[in-house]
Image (cartoon, rainbow, N blue to C red):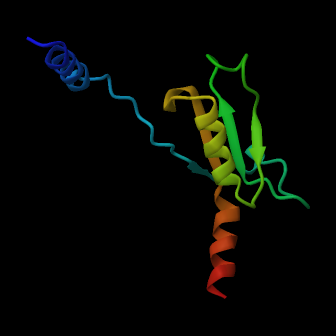
Amino acid sequence: MTKTQKAFDENVKRLNKSKKSTSTKITITQSRKKDLFPYMGMYKMPYRFEPMPEIADRLNLAWFDEHYGDERMMEHIKKHKLKSHQYKAYVNYWWLKSKKEQEKS
């Protein structure tokens, strides 16, 4: 077998190995609990990122604003390469409801 054929076969084997699948889907849960969102006054922060205990020493509780907050939260999760069991992401249900009502008008 030639070197190129051997290298090709090794590359095919490496590519065909089944990798452990990890969930990359980011789920943001709607929450009706107003106490989770203390920053809904003048500056609205309807997105909440909550690290689970295993990563709480590395990341803090965070809120994201109404302007592209969902995108910023997703970037934050991707930046730290978090898996779905390492955090909880919430959006304020009441803010979403009022936003949808404003769009209808």
In the rendered image, the vertical position of residue 13 relative to residue 23, given as above or below: above
- Residue at position x 14%, y 19% from top? 5
Q: Quadrant of the C terminus?
A: bottom right
In the rendered image, the vertical position of residue 84 relative to residue 68, given as above or below: above
| Residue that extends furthest to the front in the rendered view of this protein | 2
**Left or right, residue 100 beside residue 17:** right
Q: Toward the viewer: 19 or 95?
A: 19
**Left or right, residue 101 beside residue 67:** left
Q: Position of residue 28 (x, y in %)?
A: 56, 47
**Left or right, residue 34 beside residue 87:** right
- Residue at position x 19%, y 24% from top? 12
How many numbered discs?
A: 0
| Residue that extends furthest to the bottom in the rendered view of this protein | 105
Q: Position of residue 67 (x, y in %)?
A: 75, 61
Q: Toward the viewer: 79 or 99?
A: 79
| Residue that extends furthest to the left in the rendered view of this protein | 1
- Residue at position x 75%, y 33% from top? 61
- Residue at position x 82%, y 58% from top? 44
Decide if residue 55 is in sight here: yes
Quadrant assignment, res 65: bottom right
Q: Toward the viewer: 68 or 11?
A: 11
| Residue that extends furthest to the right in the rendered view of this protein | 42
In the rendered image, the vertical position of residue 100 relative to residue 49, given as above or below: below
Quadrant assignment, res 48: top right
Q: Quadrant of the N terminus?
A: top left
Decide if residue 32 is in sight here: no
Q: Position of residue 56 (x, y in %)?
A: 70, 20
In the rendered image, the vertical position of residue 30 relative to residue 96, given as above or below: above
Q: Position of residue 100 (x, y in %)?
A: 62, 74
Quadrant assignment, res 46: bottom right
